[in-house]
Amino acid sequence: MASDIEQNDVLDNVLAHALTRLGYQGLPAALVRYLLVVTAVGPIAAFAAAAIWSPKPSTGDALWAVGLVVVTIVAEMAPLHLTHRTIVNVNTAAFVAAILLLPTALPGVIALIAVTAAQLLRRLEAMEALFNIGQTALYVTAGALVFHATRGIPLGPDIGTLASVGSIMLAAMAMHVMNTALVAGASSMQLGT
């Protein structure tokens, strides 16, 4: 019994130390849990999609994937400053391109790799970087899955051989709604609303 208590104390101390090192100290417990869940679920979703829909990518797919990782890193590192108050990050264009051009297995993993590299290069606070990585992997994987599910359904005119306009719009909307919901969830918990 005493060894169980000592073991729990050690685990509590290790967890508290890790949370402090990652920048979670002082945050509400519900927010910490939320951030940790998003941080974990994003990569899990990306790798699960890759495992489930894992056709062997062609050389062309691999080249597109590498190119899109590079473009995404550049987009993350250099947002467009339209005005002093308007900054646009064009990484979503690369994510949509990955969803449209590559097998379902790849977009989430591409987002995970690219955003991880960009976050490391930007040297953001660990808590923010981890959330950004998980959030991006999650919303890009969601968009890829929606596109996969609707690609063969005639939802308006087709855009060449890609898919119907409706399918593309649904994937983009899924990405936007998921991204907005994930950020809004964190914001509302931090503000206590």
Image (cartoon, rainbow, N blue to C red):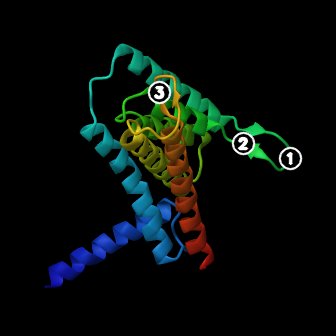
Q: Secondary structure at mark 1?
A: loop
Q: Nearer the viewer, residue 117 or 179?
A: 179
Q: Would you name the residue on which mark 2 appears?
A: 88
Badge number at residue 144: none
In the image, residue 65 lies at what x, y percent? 45, 25
Q: Is residue 24 above or below residue 54?
A: below
Q: Is residue 61 visible?
A: yes
Q: Is residue 145 above or below residue 41?
A: above
Q: Nearer the viewer, residue 188 or 28?
A: 188
| Mark 2 vs 1: CB contact within 8 A | no
Crowding near the residue tagged with mark 1, few <14, some 14–19, many ≥20 C-alpha atoms within 10 Å = few
Mark 2 or mark 3: name the one nearer the start of the chain: 2
Badge number at residue 84: 1
Crowding near the residue tagged with mark 2, few <14, some 14–19, many ≥20 C-alpha atoms within 10 Å = few
Q: Would you name the residue on which mark 3 appears?
A: 162
Residue drawn at point x = 13 percent, y = 85 percent: 1
Q: CA distance from mark 2 to mark 3?
A: 26 Å
Q: Is residue 34 above or below residue 43?
A: below
In the image, residue 117 lies at what x, y percent? 51, 36
